[in-house]
Amino acid sequence: MHPVLKRIALNGLLTALVLGLIGLAFAELGSILLGGSTGRTAAVESVAPPPAADPVKDALRSRVPLMMALWGFLFVAVGEGVLYLLRGGRTSAATNTTPTVIKPDPAEVLLEELLRQVEAAQANPPAESPPVPEHQGPAAPNLRESAPSPSTTTAENSPTPELVPGERGA
């Protein structure tokens, strides 16, 4: 079966079913409204028996759902046909058997290469280098003695001068 006919059958039947159910609700609503507008008074109704079958209500209950279902199916069939003509009968990607070659993005290739290099470097750690002596000759200063102390109690580490209470800084 042609794919367009399958789509028409599936979508058209679902639309006809839904519109038929809505048509039933409309027909019942219409028969309720027609039953309430007979123009009879309560006194006349108690004397005369109501008619056995109302042909208008029966016609509403059968014709409205069928016509809504029929017109819904026809609308879907025409719509699918127009879409098929406008699209030109393209084949879907699933039925296309020619393989498509996807070229990777150059940035992605570069990132993958960098990732491989980092993983290789982590897998093979470099040999440990010998420790560097503290003094590398007679002219090397001892940085540990000349660096300021990290304690907060000494005055030489304070970046601002101490203020005496009552004085303002200039």
Image (spheres, rainbow, N blue to C red):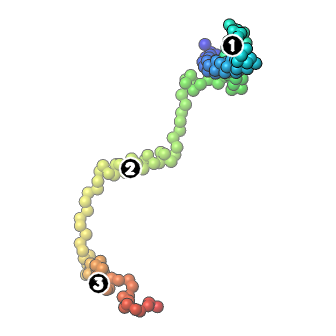
| Label 2 packing within 10 angstroms: few (<14), some (14-19), many (20+) | few
Residue kind at label 1, given as amino acid type: Ser
33 and 6: which one is in front? 33
Which numbered disc, 3 or 2, marks the residue that appears first in the sequence? Answer: 2
Q: CA distance from mark 3 to mark 1?
A: 112 Å
Using residue 129 as the reference point, say whether residue 167 is left or right of it: right
- Where residue 156 appears, as percent x and y from the top left, is 32, 85
Residue 77 position, x and y percent, is 68, 19
How far from the left and from the top, in percent, is residue 120? 34, 48
Dot 2 or dot 1: first in sequence order is 1
Q: Nearer the viewer, mark 2 or mark 1?
A: 1
160, above or below 103, in the image: below
Judge left or right: residue 121 versus residue 99. Answer: left
User: Viewer-nearest of labels 3 and 2?
Assistant: 3
Which residue in the structure is indicated by mark 2?
Answer: 117
The residue that mark 3 highlights is 154
